[in-house]
Amino acid sequence: MRRRLFYTDHYSLPLPDGHKFPIQKYRLLREMLEREGGFEFTPAPLAKPEVIALAHEAAYVEQFVRGELPAQVMRRIGFPWSPELVKRTLGSVGGTLSAAMDALHPPSAAEKSGAPRASWGGTLAGGTHHAFRGEGSGFCVFNDIAVAILWLRSKGLAQRAAVIDLDVHQGDGTAQMFQEDAEALTTSVHCRANFPFRKQMSKIDVELEDGTGDEEYLKVVDALLPRVGEFGAEILFYQSGVDGLATDALGRLSLSHAGLRERDRRVCGFARDAGIPLVITLGGGYSRPIEHTVLAHANTFRVAREVL
């Protein structure tokens, strides 16, 4: 079966020379997976502003779309405003919404077997976990995972959601937005001394020291997954950032490609064994050369296809 993945790299994003955001990774990732086959690629639709306003202040959404945010707000986000940025941002949210619908869609009769399985959906974008209700940060304008959780609730499709955020940077926006929400479990495994330097409180936070390697990291993941299972989520969002790689310019951990593949295998295996629909988004990745980031992201979807 060819698994559908949503992509956003058809929305260009003009950035000044020397900008540290690796926008080209999205196209390179899609092209790598396309060459291998086994996936179907669909352009991510644009999310509607009124849907995004389920999680964000309506005035903030409107000002961003119109290009009316103050300069200091855009500096905190880290991108210059442009019409292309608006389309790509709306597409990033739209890809996660679409992937969530794929995850909740039951398997066809042809897919059914006696083995445990979980349905899943994937987007080659998203994971923008530094966006708060009324402002963006760290290359994140809107919090696609938060929007998806609240949108699914509004449609009566899923009430209880869990987030496994394994980006090297804490998912501070997601943590803050659901801090008082008993129906959402936010978890974050991140580098203690890394951005954001003012941390929020996830329901479960695990802080790692600089230089943490594969063995210790996987022990943390193994300890986290049963706690997620106890929550009884109806849908699981996996923020699969790969900026924990030893080659990452912004990461400060010492993970290998093999370690990240094993991380992905354990998360996907957990979702499969628990029968929880799984939504896989990207997250950070700033390795030099960029090919390390692209390979690590590709491995996430390869593992998901194999396990799920």
Image (spheres, grey):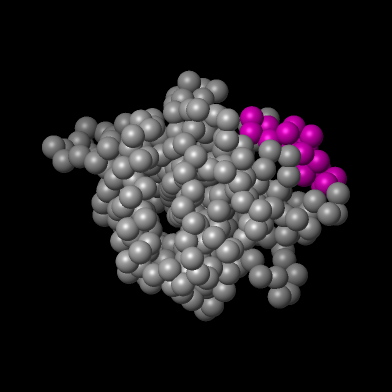
At a point 49% along the width and 57% down the height, the residue shown is: 207
In the image, 152: left or right of 12? left
Residue 27 in the image: state x and y as whole percent: 53, 63
- Residue 14 at what x, y percent from top left? 72, 63
Q: Identify which residue, 61 or 251, lies in the foreground.
A: 251
At 49% from the left and 33% from the top, the residue drawn is 184
Q: Quadrant of residue 216?
A: bottom left
- Left or right: 57 with respect to 185? right
Indicate whether 218 appears above or below 149: below
Is 57 in the magenta? yes
Q: Is residue 181 above or below residue 253?
A: above
In the rendered picture of this protein, how many numbered marks are placed on residues? Answer: 0
Position of residue 94 relative to residue 255, above or below, is above
Q: Quadrant of residue 256?
A: bottom left
Front residue (pair 15, 144): 144
Q: Quadrant of residue 260?
A: bottom left
Question: Residue placed at 73% from the left, 39% from the top?
Answer: 134
| Residue 244 seen in the figure | yes
Farthest residue to the bottom: give it.
289
State the residue in front, 179 or 109.
179
| Residue 96 place in picture, x, y as percent | 51, 43
Residue 211 lies in the magenta-colored region: no
Most extreme residue toward the left is 114
Residue 29 visible in the picture? no
Residue at figure coordinates x 49%, y 40% from the top left:
203
Q: Which residues are magenta?
A: 53-69
